[in-house]
Every structure is written in structure tokens, then in C-alpha cells.
Image (cartoon, rainbow, N blue to C red):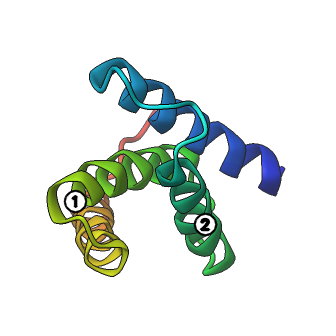
Amino acid sequence: MTSQTIEGACAFAWRNYLLLNSGISENDNRRSALYRYVTDLRDMGEDNFDLLQIAAVAYLKKLDELHDDRCARLAADQVLAECLESRSAQPTRRS
């Protein structure tokens, strides 16, 4: 399941990135950087597919804006933290 989660989150983010950025090669270095970032998140214990997708999209966006892997990781981590905080603040629903 772990590799499927990583592959799925990366594929989602990469497809959307290519749709927004024509002229980018399928084998661009950003794709491998994305995979490393999502793998690192998963290795740190994040296994929620939706959150990994959000972090992956944020990472690619920030990588384009900041042109620096470390800064993009920090910015995407901040987006992920905000999502986690938002989710924990929502009241639980009863069926």
C-alpha cells in the first residue's frame, strides 16, 4: 500500500502540473524531486492519501515559485500543517 500511496499522490500532482505547464518534459527533474518529497513525507508517517496529494501539489507550485528544493519543502510542509490543523479543528460527525 505504501508505494501505491506514493505513486498515486505523485501521479495526481504531476498530471495536473503538466496540464498547467505545457512544454515540460515528462522526465523533468521536478518529477523525481516530487517523488523524493512525497516519499520523505510517507517515511515520516504521513499516510493519508488526500493529504499527500495536497502536499505534492503544493510542493510543485512552491518549487516553481521559489526555485529552491529546501524552501519548497518548507512551504509545502506549512500547507500540510495547515490542512492537518484545519482537520483537527473540525467537529466530528455522528451518523
Q: CA distance from mark 1 to mark 2?
A: 26 Å
Residue located beneath label 2 in the image: 36
Residue 64 vs 82, above or below: the answer is: above
Q: Secondary structure at mark 1?
A: helix
Residue placed most toward the observer, 65 or 80: 65
Residue placed most toward the observer, 6 or 1: 6
Relative image position of residue 79 (x, y in whole percent): 24, 62
Relative image position of residue 18 (x, y in whole percent): 41, 26
Disc nearer the start of the sequence (1/2):
2
Q: Comparing marks 1 and 2, which lies closer to the viewer?
A: 2
Q: Residues within 10 Å of mark 1 (few under 14, many from 20)?
A: few
Residue placed most toward the observer, 15 or 6: 15
Residue 67 vs 56, above or below: the answer is: below
Question: Looking at the rendering, which quadrant does residue 48 occupy?
Answer: bottom right
Relative image position of residue 58 (x, y in whole percent): 30, 52
Residue type at numbered disc 2: Arg
Q: Residue at x 36, y 73 (%)?
A: 69
Relative image position of residue 14 (x, y in whole percent): 49, 35
Residue 4 vs 84, above or below: the answer is: above
Residue 82 vs 15, above or below: the answer is: below
Q: In the drawing, what numbered circle is on residue 86? A: 1
